């Protein structure tokens, strides 16, 4: 459904107002209730690296409430019961969320250790455009639980020898009778310790896979119950400055999956993967714009309040230039991201997937946010490094996000590839 600009503006405002009030009434009080645990990782994680039960239950409860209130699934396809709000709404919403709350809110948005949010579903942990075409079994047996926020997924593409290079996968599925038998290891999988289902990619046709054709890759996407025999999610990795994280391994040893649990089409799994990853890249870019704005807001306030040598920091040209550089970069990233979202929204009429633009937005916004947070820390002096303000966490989030959903180098590879193929329109 296409909206008029006025309708879109109203949807954006209504969604931001609604979500903010949801966060204020459902997330902030929970963060206050568990403040002592959330601020102390020795108490936040158990010996097995998983969140302690009360925090896990609190996050699960927020997700279920968000689903009931309609926020969890607002970007999911209408065909599975979502609102399918257009991409520009997502950009404005994530920007507003991160500008208001900043970093380190485990009950609201992602922290460095938790790269998903319990309030809005992403392709990683819940309903997304990857479910636009699902068969009856998945639609009736799995999707309702994902839509209700009662169960979550993880997205398993990366392997020990296949990160940037997804043409080096070792994970294979072989048809035995009417079942597929999966063997292999998926690595660095966000939400793997908690996911009820792993949405994973395995080679099903070696011949096709050797030809490296994205559209008919010989890779198939399966939805696998993580509690079933032959699936192990015990390994969890500590991530950048944290004692644990929500990233781990999903290991398959003769895990059996029925044909009906294929997502999308047989041998065309990389198309599903790219649909999810593209959505994720735009969401990351939007969040980075909001997080950078939050860091700049903090910098402006501090520069006005903090005096050195008898004058506020804000009077010094060295500080002003840092503020201005951040503003220039935020403006550029914001409008690159918004324009990309418009191109995504226009896809049904143009038939053009903005491949280059999605990569530009992701690479630029993440690198921009890291630079803005770095300047914000510098402007705050010693305070910038204190754990209290959240600036160091914001810096680490931005730094972390230069790797997942395609590294900065892979985005540049994609951009250059498109340019060389003749896609030079800006
Ligand atoms: C916090 C976090 C969460 C993640 N979540 C998920 C998830 O939920 N699901 C999932 O499937 N994966 C996930 N990943 C994996 C992530 O997508 C990969 O780490 C990423 O794609 C890079 O792969 P790699 O780590 O194997 O690095 P490599 O591919 O080995 O790359 C190493 C370095 O070399 C560079 N490089 C590689 N090839 C080239 C080239 N041709 N030209 C120039 N430079 C090159 C890379 O940019 C990088 O800097 C996550 C990773 C992290 C850190």
Image: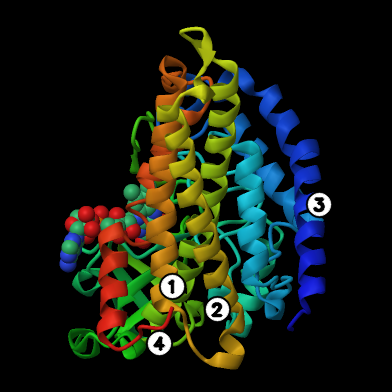
Q: Position of residue 220 (x, y in %)?
A: 37, 80
Q: Disc 4 or disc 2, which is closer to the eye?
A: 2
Question: Which residue appears at 41% of the width and 81% of the height?
Answer: 271
| Residue 109 on image: x %, y % | 59, 44
Looking at marks 4 and 2 on the same chain, the residue that comes earlier in the sequence is marked by 4
Q: Is label 3 in a helix, a strand or a loop?
A: helix
How dense is the environment of label 4, judged by Cα within 10 Å: few (below 14), some, or many (20 and up)? some
Q: Nearer the viewer, mark 3 or mark 1?
A: 1
Task: Reply above or below: 388 against 246.
Answer: above
Q: Please report contact status of discs 4 and 2: CB closer than 8 Å, yes or no.
A: no
Q: Secondary structure at mark 1?
A: helix
Give whichever of discs 2 and 3 has the lower sequence position.
Answer: 3
Per the rendering, the mark at residue 6 is none
Q: CA distance from mark 1 to mark 4?
A: 29 Å
According to the picture, the residue beneath numbered tag 1 turns out to be 357
| Disc 2 element | helix
């Amino acid at each position: 459904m296409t909206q008029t600009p006025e309708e879109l503006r109203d949807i954006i405002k209504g969604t931001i107002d609604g979500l903010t009030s949801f966060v204020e009434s459902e997330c902030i009080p929970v963060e206050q209730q568990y403040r002592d645990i959330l601020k102390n990782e020795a108490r936040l994680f158990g010996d097995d690296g998983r969140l302690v039960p009360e925090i896990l239950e609190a996050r699960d409860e927020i997700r279920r409430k968000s689903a009931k209130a309609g926020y969890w699934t607002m970007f999911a396809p209408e065909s599975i019961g979502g609102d399918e709000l257009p991409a520009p709404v997502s950009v404005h919403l994530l920007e507003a969320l991160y500008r208001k709350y900043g970093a380190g809110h485990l009950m609201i948005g992602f922290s460095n250790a938790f790269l998903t949010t319990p309030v809005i579903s992403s392709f990683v942990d819940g309903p997304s455009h990857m479910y636009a075409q699902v068969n009856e079994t998945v639609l009736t047996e799995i999707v309702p639980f994902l839509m209700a926020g009662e169960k979550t997924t993880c997205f398993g593409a990366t392997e020990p020898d296949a990160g940037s290079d997804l043409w080096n996968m070792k994970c294979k599925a072989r048809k035995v009778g009417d079942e597929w038998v999966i063997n292999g290891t998926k690595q660095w999988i966000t939400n793997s310790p908690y996911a009820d289902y792993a949405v994973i990619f395995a080679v099903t046709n070696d011949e096709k896979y050797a030809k490296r054709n994205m559209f008919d890759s010989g890779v198939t996407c399966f939805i696998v119950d993580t509690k079933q025999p032959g699936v192990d999610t015990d390994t969890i990795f500590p991530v950048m400055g944290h004692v644990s994280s929500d990233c781990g391994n999903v290991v398959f040893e003769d895990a059996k999956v029925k044909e009906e649990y294929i997502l999308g089409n047989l041998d065309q799994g990389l198309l599903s993967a790219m649909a999810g990853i593209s959505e994720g890249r735009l969401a990351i870019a939007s969040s980075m714009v909001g997080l950078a704005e939050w860091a700049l807001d903090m910098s402006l306030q501090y520069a006005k309040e903090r005096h050195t040598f008898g004058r506020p920091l804000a009077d010094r040209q060295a500080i002003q230039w840092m503020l201005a550089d951040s503003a220039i970069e935020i403006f550029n990233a914001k409008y690159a991201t918004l324009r990309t979202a418009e191109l995504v929204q226009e896809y049904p009429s143009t038939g053009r997937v903005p491949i280059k633009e999605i990569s530009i937005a992701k690479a630029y916004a993440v690198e921009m946010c890291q630079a803005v947070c770095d300047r914000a820390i510098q402007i705050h002096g010693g305070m910038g490094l204190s754990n209290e303000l959240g600036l160091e966490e914001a810096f680490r989030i931005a730094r972390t996000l230069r790797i997942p959903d395609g590294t900065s180098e892979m985005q540049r590879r994609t951009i250059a590839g498109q340019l060389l193929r003749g896609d030079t329109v800006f």
